[in-house]
Image (tube, helix red, strand yellow):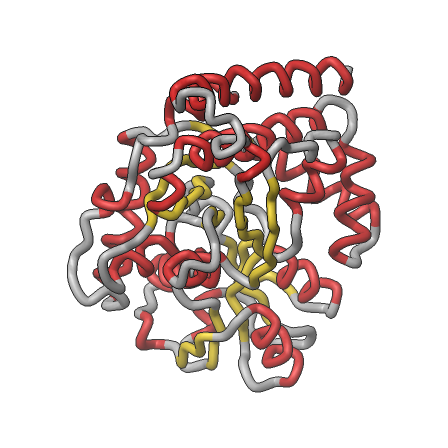
Amino acid sequence: MLFRRTLRSSAALIALFLPFATACGGDAEADSPADVTLRVGSTGWKSEEAVLKYAGLDDTPYKVKWSLFQGGDQQLQAIRAGALDLASSSEIPPVFAAADGAPNFKVVAVQRGATLNQEVVVPKGSKVTDIAGLKGRKVGYVQNTTAHYFLYELLKRAGLKWSDIDAKPLLPNDGLAALNGGSIDAFASYGTSIITAHQQGATTIGSGKDILSGNFLWSARDSVLGSPEEKAAAADLIARITKAYAYVRDGHLDGFAKVTADATHQPLAQAKKDLAAAQAQRPTRARTVGDDTIASQQKVADVFTELGALKSELDVKSFWSTALDADLEKAL
């Protein structure tokens, strides 16, 4: 089955790149996919790179250089600095990257994903049992990320204002250290940092599971969209990740759970449980840009304006683009 999928993937890729080769008057060397190198970001651990390898879909005709970051906000900063071509993040980091000046990127695709392990946790032995109990306490959070957003929403639902807590912006690793060291009373974070916190005895007092949309965005540098070859490569890579997760769901969950457990240093049973729950809640798959996905991010941007984190209202559709839609539809 995997062999047939690989053949189909290769055939689709040839078809995807063929128009670009013929359109350039036979200058095959200059326009070869082999000349393309995509610098791609990943958060927490290199799960995208790992799932492609596990599914046998890492044999791309272009080169991919993966870089690891603690958050999507850092990926967008890297795109702004010219150090990344393609970034994956929640809806939030592109908002702040765009609000910081004229953006040199566009949101070009949406990857639907689970919203599990997005939590507010307190250390072992804490007397705080709910979000309302955070009033007047020191609360760490990962600034300009999902953690920032769902912490604000959870506080509001508990009848608290942002000013009712002593909010401390911290990176995931720093937040874990602060939580264990007693310098903060709670920590809002995501992914591997939450997994590790639970391994260290932390308990959950609030979750972003039903607050977050599950839209995770692919942002591409404008220079990528200006190159037919790089654009096709970006679409193919995003599509391959979708196909790799479909392969995992098609009877190969145990094997990828082992890969996940080894990478995140957690018990295999827990990794399998989390992976199964994530794919059951919202199977990982890409889709093209739509009015609904833009509206979803606009809602998020409006919350940060209300919070005062954005200096002025932001029209998010100004940094979305359908330039990848045709290539992505072909690749999927």
Query: Is 268 situated above or below 157?
Result: above
Image location (x, y in percent) of residue 159: 33, 64
Can residue 111 be seen here? yes
Residue 13 lies in quadrant? top right
Which quarter of the picture shows residue 192?
Answer: bottom right
Locate residue 116 relative to residue 159 in the image: left or right. Answer: right
Q: Position of residue 22 (x, y in %)?
A: 44, 17
Q: Is residue 25 left or right of residue 315?
A: right
Residue 222: percent from left, percent from top: 33, 45
Asked if residue 205 shows in the view, the reply is: no
**Residue 179 vertical placement versus 47 (above, below):** below
Q: Residue at x 44, y 42 (%)?
A: 218
Tell me which corner region of the image, top left, top right, bottom left or bottom right, holds residue 101.
bottom left
Residue 175's spot in the image, x, y percent? 57, 74
Of 139 and 216, nearer the camera is 216
Instruction: Please tell me which residue is depicted at 77% across the width and 15% down the height of the picture.
Output: 1
Q: Would you place residue 2 above or below residue 203 in this image? A: above
Report the residue at 83% width, 53% height from top. Answer: 267
Spot the residue most to the left: 312
Decide which of 5, 63 is in the foreground and name it.
63
| Residue beneath the point at 31% across and 53% down | 104
Q: Please, is residue 153 above or below residue 37 in the view?
A: below
Q: Is residue 236 left or right of residue 275?
A: left
